[in-house]
Structure formats: structure tokens, C-alpha cells
Amino acid sequence: DTEVTQTPKHLVMGMTNKKSLKCEQHMGHRAMYWYKQKAKKPPELMFVYSYEKLSINESVPSRFSPECPNSSLLNLHLHALQPEDSALYLCASSQDEYGGPGTEAFFGQGTRLTVV
Amino acid sequence: GESVGLHLPTLSVQEGDNSIINCAYSNSASDYFIWYKQESGKGPQFIIDIRSNMDKRQGQRVTVLLNKTVKHLSLQIAATQPGDSAVYFCAENFGNEKLTFGTGTRLTIIP
């Protein structure tokens, strides 16, 4: 199994809603990531979890709250989002948190989020 | 500051020809580079990687070249096929969890 699975594929939410994005991998990877990608732009790193602990937060607003319940799961809790938060949210995982061959990140298909 | 950039935002290539996608980086401390392919509506897909102690690496129909002197990276795709149409990103790693993506090049294959 070399897949990173994200649910839901599409999500429309109001600015007062609370929702969660989910990500799952069964490759035994120890690092998991959330990226945000706006249209026609490269992915931008949001959070990194290494061995289930938050290791990087790229100054993401608190309306985005990550959670890593176990080594296979990664959630992103959303609350009071703004329309400009509409984007493709990508989850990725890698074998280890350090760069180099064998630690390349595998991406899920993403959740297309629209905030209305 | 550090940045990873691409010379051309779009590239159109005749089917069967070879494609070359270029990428410039500015951080001489970067030690690991990855090329990703992203098709419409999908997440980035790993293509090939290269470490800074290498100049060239080959995969199936793809070759990555690294020129550290001019901080330049290229992806060569041989005998391009319609399925190669996508946006290609180079990404840079400094030996930690942080992967920095370049701006991307859209490759269009002309039948």
C-alpha cells in the first residue's frame, strides 16, 4: 500500500462552520504533512508531524488546528475560516522527517475546500 | 533568501519529442532535490530525486541533471506522451522536513 488517502475529496463550508479534514497512510511513515495549494501556485507547507509530534508550524492561523491521533492518521480541524482559505489541502507522508533519498514525500489527492 | 524558481511557466512539446524543464535554486546549502508531477485535480506525484553529490540520475524515460556551479536543475522527459501533460514542480530540501516547491511549469503535449 503506497497510498495517502484524504477525505473528503470536496468540502463546502460556511464561515461559522467547524469541519475536519482527514488523512491516512499505512506505509509506516513517521512524518506527515499538511500543505495548502492555491490555484496555479505550488504547495505551501503548513504543518509537519514527526513521530506524532508537531515539529513545524509555518505560522498558520489558529483557525487551522492539526491533530495526529496516531502514526497513521492526521487531521486538520477547521473553524471560522475565511473565503480566502479556499484552496486544495494536501496531506503527505514520508518515511522519516529528514530529507534525502528514501524520505521523499508521498501526497494524497487533496481536499478541495470552498469557504462561503 | 532561499528560493526555488523555474525559468518557464509553460512549455509545449510535440508528442514523441523530448522535453526539458528547468529549475533554478539559490541556496547553495540545498542537498536534495525532487521533481514532482501534478495532474489536474490530483496531488503531486514523485517522479525522481537527486542528491547534491550527484550530477545526473536516470529513471524510466526521465533524467534529472544537477549543475551546482550555476545552481540549476533540469528534468528531461524522453519521447513525451499525452499522459505527460501536467504541471511539473521542482522541490528543494535542506536536510529537514521542510520541502520548498518552485513555481511550477505547465507541460502541454501537442498530438
Image (tube, coloured by chain):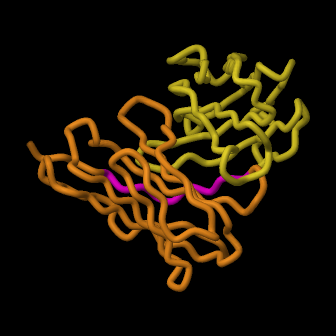
Q: Nearer the viewer, residue A17 or B6?
A: B6
- B105 magenta-colored: yes
Q: Which chain is orange?
A: B
Along the viewing direction, whichever of A102 and A18 lies nearer the viewer: A102
Outermost left residue: B111
**Quadrant of residue B60 in the image?**
top left
State the yellow chain: A
Q: Is B33 above or below relative to A104? A: below
Depth check, front residue: A93 or A12? A93
Q: Position of residue B63 (x, y in %)?
A: 40, 57
Whether residue B103 is situated above or below residue A18 in the rendered picture: below
Q: Residue at x 20, y 38 (%)?
A: B82
Q: Position of residue A73 (x, y in %)?
A: 77, 19
* Numbered range of the magenta stretch: B98-106
Q: Is residue A113 visible?
A: no
Q: Residue at x 67, y 44 (%)?
A: A102
B66 magenta-colored: no
Q: Residue at x 37, y 47 (%)?
A: B87
